[in-house]
Amino acid sequence: MPITIVKGSKEYIKVEVIDNSDTPITSLSGATPKYDTTEEDLTAVQTNQTPSVSGMFLYCLVDGTLAGYVIGEKYLLFPYFTLAPEIPRLGPIDFFIV
């Protein structure tokens, strides 16, 4: 089932992060998570946003009141982490404005 956000609402997209490293972490709270949303052509809509964190879940708030979101269009969510010297970027996670 596709992720949908109603135009004019503000809703969270829940993202589970799985750590496959040799020493897996159990919480993302110290990982300085951020996220961006873009149109399909990668034009930015929301940038450098801070999600809420609970364990290994990110809660990314999509603000459907913004003019950049158009009903019927597909958008992309890109969570990322600022862990110097690396900046791993996840996604894209597709969602639609309805």
Image (tube, helix red, strand yellow):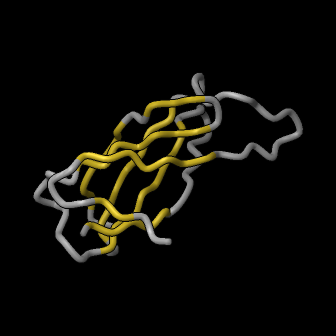
Image quadrant where residue 28 sits? top right
The image shows residue 90 at horizontal and vertical percentages of: 56, 54
Looking at the rendering, which quadrant does residue 73 occupy?
A: bottom left
* Above or below 69: residue 90: above
Q: Residue at x 64, y 36 (%)?
A: 56
Residue 16 position in % (x across, y down): 61, 47
Image x and y of residue 78, in percent? 46, 55
User: Residue at horizontal 57%, vertical 24%?
Assistant: 29
Question: Which residue is found at the position 42% from the left and 57% from the top?
Answer: 77
- Residue found at the far right of this picture: 22
Residue visible at 35% across and 64% down? 4
Compare residues 45 and 69 and report the one nearer the observer: 69
Please tell me how many numbered marks the rendered image carries. Answer: 0
- Farthest-out residue, left: 67
Residue 69 falls in image quadrant: bottom left
On screen, 54 above or below 8? above
Please state, as top left, top right, bottom left or bottom right, where the C terminus lies in the image: bottom left
Please tell me which residue lies in front, 92 or 83.
92
Which is more toward the observer, 85 or 40? 40
Q: Residue 95: x and y, percent?
A: 39, 66
The furthest residue to the top: 30
Q: Is residue 70 above or below residue 78?
A: below
Task: Determine whether, in the image, residue 25 is placed left or right of residue 81.
Answer: right
